[in-house]
Amino acid sequence: MRNIIFSGIIACFFTTIMPAAFAQPLAGTDDLGRTLLQNDAVGDPKQGRHIAMFYFLWQGVSPTSPKHWDLTEIYANHPEVADDCDDPNWGGPKTMYYFWGQPIYGYYRGDDYWVHLRNIQLLTDADVDFLVIDATNRLTYPTQSEALMKAMDAVRAQGKKPPGIVFYTNTRSGETIQEAYEQFYMEGAPYRHPECWFYLDGKPLIIGASRDVKDTRCLDFFTIRESQWPTEPQRVNGWPWISFTRKPEVHLNARGEREIINVSVAQHPNPTAGMGGSAFYGYIGNWGRSYRNGSPGNPETDIFYGYNIQEQWEVALKEDVPFVFVTGWNEWIAGRWDSKDKNPKHSWFCDLASPEFSRDLEPSLTADLKDHYYMQLVNNIRRYKGVEKIPASDALTKPIKQLSDWQTISRVYTDYTGDTQHRNHAGAQSEPATVYTNTTGRNDFHIMKVAHDKNNFYFYVETSDNITPNTGDNWMRLYIDADRKATTGWKGYDYRIIGGKTLQQYVNGNWQNVGNKSLKTVVEKNKMMITVPRTFPLLKNVSDFEFKWTDNMQAEDPMDWYVNGDTAPGGRFNYVYLSTK
Ligand SMILES: [Ca+2]
Ligand SMILES: [Ca+2]
């Protein structure tokens, strides 16, 4: 969102199974101990509430600084660059673009389908309704948008409900809207994915300056909401991508209805400083991730908790309007420009510059942010929209003895398919050019079932293709949080079954075998079942538990689940199995 005046801002279901059998509200606890809220806390799903997520496709389109491009690393290794805009350790000249840190998928480009598919899965699980593409700088990113929409299409084809797409234009809005129309929307457009369009008032929604739109085709085709900068008075129909008041304001539509409010991870109301001024030169007046109660907080200890955006969410939840615009998912990059503080040796970054002064929710290992902001997002969306109850299952009257017995179990848990596709795509870096590869995708989880009787728990899993031969420990693992307590076990998991046969319990900080003779595992083509006797101490009195399947983990770290192999459910989530009492 760069070029603009003042701040410049640079700126489920799901397969083939009956809906009633769907058992998917996911559970989970993040590394900070925050547990996802369930139906008992947030109530049933509510109609008429929508989440818009600001999403960015410009990584690698705006030229990445060639030799060094990660501001966190540059500043850690060569803090002196801040005082010399020509220092070679910047790795490139002014006007080039820098990542503030590293996404978990590497410094990816905006046309990397493999990344978009993962993001669409995460945002579908979070119940985001549509992505708002930053097209405020005149570009419409056709091939990047195409990669993103293909990922949306792939998830929708599985019967799940991925977010749709909306473009946010501003600079030369009339011609940008016209270009979007011709690229994405009109009959015969080269990148036309109608099922991805998000509709408002009966037409596909686009955001921009309606007064600039002269093309009557566009005026007829779209519902236009107005681009709304935080430095302007409220416009009728304005859709704010950020708010520079501590208490974000509700914006009204032309009918006078309260329509939308923005929440953002961090804000930069001091345009002279820009986020870079606060990150590198100590200028005040911008609000980082840790800001709250009128105080900048202590980023070193506070950055993980998302206090700033939480303060905004509390306002948004209270206002309870039909749209919450969240800023944002994956902005990552900012251009390095001439300073505005009268020191010509300084560099200026507008929208982001460091872990504290950036506003991405997408997981990152930089500054140990992990997936804290994502999990916080999921919880806030649940508070806003509600969540389904988790259904409970009766005990079986007849034990399951063979794979065909599972046909009578109609309650299923589903995972995304196609997410084991290997990655082979250029990153945004140029010197050296980097190609990101990932070949860890192997067994693609699709359908899971669980059942119980007084003697056993039964687990069933079905993959897209035939299950690969058993290669050892990290093959087709099953994790069980037997007491549904994140504080016991490894990351909450008290048991796991490795290599399809060995039951382990997490005791005193280690996984220990607790016997494998009694586990019965059957594998046939793309189906597998494991029977777990309830004689193990922790399982004896358990009626409810959480579980997760993983295949081909590369590291003993939940963050690995976002990137490698396959996991069901995704990321840090668990499925929940409840028994009728
Ligand atoms: Ca899968
Ligand atoms: Ca536990």
Image: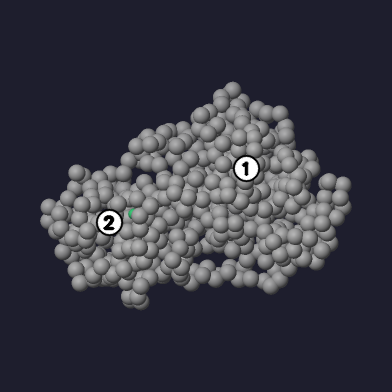
| Labels 1 and 2: the sequence-earlier one | 1
Q: Secondary structure at mark 1?
A: loop
Left or right: 23 in relation to 442: left
Q: Where is residue 241 drawn, in percent x and y?
A: 64, 39
Ligand 2 image-quadrant field: bottom left
Q: Tell me which amino acid carries mark 1.
A: Gly
Note whether 40 is above or below 375 in the view shown: above
Name the residue rendered at 26%, 49% in the picture. 544
Mark 1 or 2, closer to the camera: 1
Name the residue rendered at 15%, 58% in the picture. 455
Q: Where is residue 233 drawn, in percent x and y?
A: 71, 29
Note whether 301 is above or below 250 in the view shown: below
Residue 269 figure quarter: top right
User: How many numbered marks does the figure carry?
Assistant: 2
Name the residue rendered at 87%, 52% in the picture. 344
Q: Tell me which amino acid carries mark 2.
A: Lys
Left or right: 476 in relation to 246: left
Note whether 316 is above or below 373 in the view shown: above
According to the image, label 1 marks what residue? 297
Q: Where is residue 24 drawn, in percent x and y?
A: 35, 48
Name the residue rendered at 30%, 64% in the picture. 505
According to the image, label 2 marks what residue? 449
Instruction: Give the spatial CA distance, label 1 vs label 2.
Output: 46 Å
The quadrant in which the C terminus is found is: top left
Q: Secondary structure at mark 2?
A: strand
Badge 1 crowding class, 10 Å Cα cut-off, few under 14, some 14 to 19, many 20 or more, is some
Q: Is residue 459 visible?
A: yes
Badge 2 crowding class, 10 Å Cα cut-off, few under 14, some 14 to 19, many 20 or more, is some
